Image (cartoon, rainbow, N blue to C red):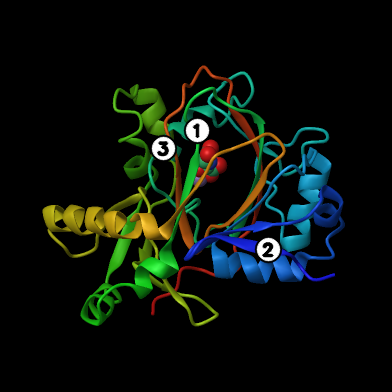
Amino acid sequence: MPLEAVNLKPSIGSELKVTAGMLAEGGLAREIRDLLVQRGVLIARDVHLNDDQQRAFTRSLGDLRLGTVRKEGEEGLMKVTMDKKVNPEYAEFFPGTFFWHMDGTYDAVPPFATVLTPRVLSAEGGQTEFANTYAAYDALAEDEKAYFETLQVVHTMQAAMFPAVPDVPVSQMQKWFTYPERVHPLVWRHKSGRKSLALSTSASHVVGLHPADSRGLLDRLIAHTTQPQFVYRHDWRMGDVLIWDNTGTIHRVRPYDAGSGRELHRFTLNGEEPISAA
Ligand code: OGA
Ligand code: MN
């Protein structure tokens, strides 16, 4: 049976008409992967995947990232929550998600894609937004494309976290500095030949530019990329599943109360290619 899908915005997002069984069984994986890299974000409503179904579905799309949390029955599962009792290891990093970012820019090869489902929703806020970085690149003027293809950007955990945790205790800050600093090209030429902007709040500075010019350029590019025509905003409902291509989008969550108990279950796929220069 062919995959049934409808576009959500002209340049980003599609809704799949599928059941939990169709996703977990894996028969649509090839078509879903192809659509994902074209559309940036895919969602389905009313599917109510449990953890095992969500893991099986994620595995059907690529190489499951196992991460550092190894609990019985929770292989590969990351609980996205600011509740330290639920996720003692990572809760303090999730404030970083309020700013536009790509996941895993501190890795040589950032994750390919992530599958999210909601388990507890906040009464207010907590919508997740995605911007298509292929479409944003394509919309640049030709001389801008040519210039940006010459630039390299330094990415750090502290650049991503400082705006989110301005009153940080030194002990917490020290953990940020244990993450590696990475230099990635600003324009990513993918194996497919398509090009995207490799942007993120983790972008500390552009190599070789004055810090003031660098900040101005990175801020302008984020503003360009997150114009409404490139953005899909997801209003969560219980039963949803959402998949995003982490290599062709940036994302952020809209403000929600840290005490709301908001919790999403996340399974991630390992990356398949480094951010390569054009
Ligand atoms: C993430 C993330 C956004 C959200 O899990 O990488 O950015 O809506 N989550 O919680
Ligand atoms: Mn993220």
Cα distance in 3D space between marks 1 and 3: 9 Å
Q: Are marks 2 and 1 in contact (CB under 8 Å)?
A: no
Depth check, front residue: 2 or 142? 2
- Residue 10, image x and y in percent? 48, 65
Observer-side mark, 2 or 3, equals 2
- Residue 164, image x and y in percent? 35, 33
Q: Could you say whether the residue bearing mark 3 is in a helix, strand or loop?
A: helix
- Which numbered disc, 2 or 3, marks the residue that appears first in the sequence? 2
Does the beta carbon at disc 1 come under 8 Å from ligand 1?
Answer: yes
128, above or below 33, in the image: above
Report whether residue 103 is seen.
yes
Q: Could you say whether the residue bearing mark 1 is in a helix, strand or loop?
A: loop
Report whether residue 182 is seen.
no
Crowding near the residue tagged with mark 1, few <14, some 14–19, many ≥20 C-alpha atoms within 10 Å: many
Is residue 62 rendered to the left or right of residue 36? right
Q: Amino acid at mark 1?
A: Gly
Q: Which residue is mark 1?
A: 126
The image quadrant where one finds the C terminus is: bottom left
Cα distance in 3D space between marks 2 and 1: 25 Å
Q: Which residue is mark 2?
A: 5
Tag shown at residue 98: 3
Q: Amino acid at mark 3?
A: Phe
Q: Could you say whether the residue bearing mark 2 is in a helix, strand or loop?
A: strand
- Which numbered disc, 1 or 3, marks the residue that appears first in the sequence? 3
Crowding near the residue tagged with mark 3, few <14, some 14–19, many ≥20 C-alpha atoms within 10 Å: many
Crowding near the residue tagged with mark 2, few <14, some 14–19, many ≥20 C-alpha atoms within 10 Å: some
- Residue 186, image x and y in percent? 34, 67
Q: Amino acid at mark 2?
A: Ala
261, above or below 53, in the image: above
